[in-house]
Image: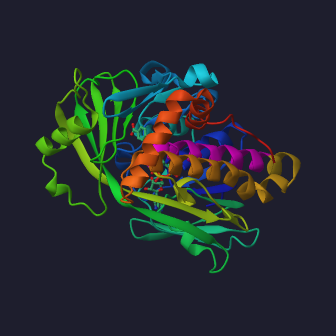
Amino acid sequence: MRTQVGIVGAGPAGLTLALLLRREAIEAVVLENRTREYVEHRVRAGLLEQNTVDLMHELGVGERLARQGLQHDGIYLRRPGRTLHIPITDLTGRHVTIYAQQEVVRDMSAALLEGGGTIHYEVADVAPHDFDSDRPRITYSVDGNGEELCCDFIAGCDGFHGVCREFVPPGVLTEHEYTYPFGWLGILAQASPATDELIYAWHEHGFALYSMRSPKVSRLYVQVPQDEDLNLWSDDRIWEELQRRLATDDWRVNEGQIIDKGITPMRTFVCEPMQYGNLFLLGDAAHIVPPTGAKGLNLAVNDARLLAAALRRWYQAGSRSGLERFSETALRRVWRAQDFSNYMTQLLHDLGRGPFDRKLQLARLDYLGRSTAAATSLAENYAGLPAQDDF
Ligand code: APR
Ligand code: PHB
């Protein structure tokens, strides 16, 4: 089999890239090792920057997002006894939208398949080869039979635990990694959110976040120790801890049936460069941000936007300059998001560094409430700086 761009992974990065390429009449084939059912139901992130929303509309996959997405104009930062509102839209002119990652994946895969695109689900043993030449190949198997996809370029959109990064020769990539000594226990609950906008809470017991998925479903998180055992957290204990960290004298979290429960480690990771020869790494395959800044999904979509623009230049004008500068260009936004996500994480979590550190956090929160400059800086990072095509 032959195509122009072989894409490994049908998550947000791979699907956005495939849709953008289809618009340019560049052929692509997506190889995914899970079932369609699995990738369309996996509970993941849920906050879209304005750039991501705009791109989904441009791609013609924004219809359900426009109907079901919850557009927010700000966030709350809470500490016991005090809640600060950051009016993001007033400060930046931009919105953020709550819309679950699996809904993005569903809309994108439906549009791609209905438009005649190709996604092979449930493929095994995926391996990229010869990407230091102009004849890269991807080998894989279907029901135990070996297959080969010849292409001009390979896009590794296979997430943090994917295979593509592992195939880059030793010594080429520099990996920067830090794992925080805590994680997030996240739940989905059949409960109407008791808040109109997200609440990020600083508390002596640790961080908590009140988010949502719809007018009837809440998404909530509490900071827990690293490698925490989920079995230690009964539903009652989870609600008790959420109330402790989020409730005020006259307001409580709405409780309901818990329909999903899981623990996410808090990791920060960047691999540089995000390319080698004709292999490009996008999204979680190249970088992970702590979820406090809600940037992971948006970065994956931005990487796809940049690579699609570079590929368009190659196929339409024969210019490799965009491809050569892909990593450098993508990494500017990745490091901005790393800085912001780590800032938000360190502002709000118990980092285990003692009372002096906790006092500094409170001083920073206080400053955000007193300085429009400080609040604007947080707001423009949270909403996402405008997209740039600066190859
Ligand atoms: N072969 C084929 N597909 C693979 C392989 C493999 N060896 N390994 C992983 N995959 C698939 C996964 O099953 C998944 O569907 O690659 C896809 C990667 O998708 P994501 O993990 O969603 O990564 P990405 O598209 O970069 O999107 C980043 O995901 O983790 C969240 O918060 C993160 O929102 C961010 C987003
Ligand atoms: C979510 O809704 O899952 C969510 C929202 C904001 C974050 C992280 C996660 O910062």
Visible residue check, residue 104: no
Q: Nearer the viewer, residue 102 or 88?
A: 88
Q: Position of residue 266 (x, y in %)?
A: 41, 56
What residue is drawn where x is 47% and y is 23%?
Answer: 72
Residues rendered magenta in the picture: 291-312
Colour logic: rainbow
Visible residue check, residue 225: yes
What residue is drawn where x is 34% and y is 30%?
Answer: 212
What residue is drawn where x is 49% and y is 43%?
Answer: 293
Q: What secondary structure predominates along the stretch shown in magenta? A: helix
Q: Nearer the viewer, residue 356 or 135?
A: 356
Left or right, 105 with respect to 326, comes to left
Left or right, 221 with respect to 376, comes to left
> In the picture, which quadrant includes the N terminus?
bottom right
What residue is drawn where x is 38% and y is 27%?
Answer: 83
Left or right, 148 with respect to 196, comes to right
Tag count: 0
- Residue 294 belongs to the span the image colors magenta: yes
Q: Position of residue 310 (x, y in %)?
A: 76, 49
- Residue 73 belongs to the span the image colors magenta: no
Residue situated furthest bottom in the rendering: 170
Q: Position of residue 184 (x, y in %)?
A: 33, 50
Up the image or down, 247 lies above or below 175; here it is above
Q: Position of residue 23 (x, y in %)?
A: 68, 36
Q: Nearer the viewer, residue 204 or 363?
A: 363
